[in-house]
Amino acid sequence: MTDTALLVIDAQESFRQRPSWQEIDSPTYLKNQQALIDGAVARGWKIVRVLHAEPEGLFSLASGFVTPISALRLEKPDLDIVKWRHSAFVGTQLEVFLTENGIRRLVISGIRTEQCCETTTRHGSDLGWQVDYVTEATHTMPLTDATGKTWTVDDIKARTAAVLDGRFARVYTIAEALDGPTRIAAE
């Protein structure tokens, strides 16, 4: 039995319908996400697939796009959930599933780096799980802030890694995450 669960957050077709999907290196994300999924399967980790829904638009259940990204192979996750908030813990059975399965370590991946992945990381850490955040298996799009500055994907990923590492998570590469915990996050 494993004490590790991989969370694949919001890797769904809704995002691929946005024009910004093509503005970034999405093939690299898909390759990296698949490598992490394949490694998790090989290690016998529990796998949780999380999809995000909203009342209207591309993320509404009625849109037909709240489905897993077709390019990713994840046939049978241990838990499939749909969330309506940024954190995968809010309003879902995630916490109960993790507790019932003896999970102590979460490995976070998916879409969007700074939004649902980061929020779930912080929430999981606050609830007491050891969280490993795999930046190279997350994906996001450029953002323009209120001052007019555009934050690139690399800017957002670096900022997210900086605020999470040693506080809410250990920021790992795919290889480091698959090798297992090797350093302690700061208390």
Image (cartoon, rainbow, N blue to C red):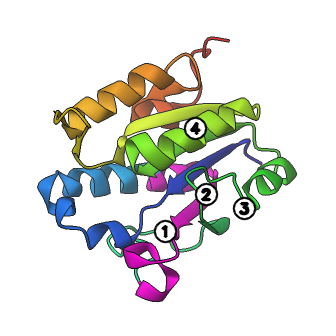
Helix, strand or loop under label 1: loop
SS for tag 4? Answer: helix
139 sits left or right of 52 in the view: left
Dot 1 or dot 4: first in sequence order is 1
Q: Are marks 1 and 4 in contact (CB under 8 Å)?
A: no
- Kind of residue sitting beneath label 3: Thr
- N-term mark: 3 or 4: 3
**Dot 3 or dot 2, earlier in sequence:** 2
Q: CA distance from mark 3 to mark 2?
A: 15 Å
Q: Does residue 132 sit above or below 20 in this rendering?
A: above
For residue 40: magenta? yes
Image quadrant occupied by the C terminus: top right
Query: Residue placed at 31% from the left, 26% from the top?
Result: 158
Which is nearer the eye, 139 or 60? 60
The image position of residue 47, as x and y in percent, is 61, 57
Q: In this rendering, does residue 40 appear at all?
A: yes
Instruction: Identify the amino acid type marked 4.
Output: Thr
Q: Earlier in the sequence, mark 3 or mark 1?
A: 1
Residue density around tag 3, few if under 14, some if 14–19, many if 20 or more, within 10 Å: some
Give percent across and percent down for residue 101.
81, 52
Real-space CA distance between mark 1 and mark 4, rounded to the nearest whole angstrom:
22 Å
Residue ID at (67%, 31%): 125
Q: Which residue is mark 3?
A: 92
Q: Which residue is identified by label 1?
A: 74
Find out whether the residues at labels 2 and 1 contact each other: C-beta distance under 8 Å: yes
Query: Start and end of the magenta stretch?
Result: 37-64
Q: Is residue 3 left or right of residue 173?
A: right
Numbered tag placed on residue 89 in the rendering: none
Q: Position of residue 152 (x, y in %)?
A: 19, 37
